[in-house]
Image (cartoon, rainbow, N blue to C red):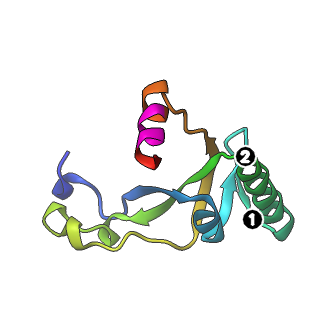
Amino acid sequence: MDRETLEANSKVHVHGKGAAELILSSCTRWVDIDGSICAMDLDKMNEFKKSIEDMAAISLRCVAFAYRICDLDEVPGKDKMDNWQLPDNELILLAIVGIKTIHSKNSTIAQHAIKH
């Protein structure tokens, strides 16, 4: 469906990901396990921060996923998308994940060879 066929009051979900601390600081709401959208209060913010700290303490790289609902007229067409500044406020937190980097035996050998 092209832009012209969408209604003027259409909404677009703009998704993003990034360093968990940065994304979290831009979130005003979060999605609960049952799919409910909840307000981000100080206690919940601190709970998420503690989770990030706990994951980082065991060498996990933390990434957060969030989205924002925008009116269609806030999102540029394909020809202007390259210069568009994605919204980074009033985000809705979807998830915080911890990613473990797994090194293969060959990469460990290569790293050792480079160091010596």
In percent of width and height, residue 109 lies at 46, 32
In percent of width and height, residue 76 lies at 24, 68
Q: How many marks?
A: 2
- Residue drawn at point x = 73 percent, y = 39 percent: 33
In percent of width and height, residue 83 lies at 23, 73
Graded by Cα atoms within 10 Å as few (under 14), some (14 to 19) or many (20 or more), the crowding at tag 1 reads some
- Res. 40 mark: 1
The residue lying toward the viewer, choosing from 73 and 14, is 14
Mark 1 residue type? Met
Residue under pointer 2: 32
Q: Which residues make up the magenta segment?
A: 109-113
Q: Is residue 49 left or right of residue 84?
A: right
**94 is within the stretch colored magenta:** no
In percent of width and height, residue 75 lies at 31, 67
Q: CA distance from mark 1 to mark 2?
A: 11 Å
Q: Is residue 92 left or right of residue 75?
A: right
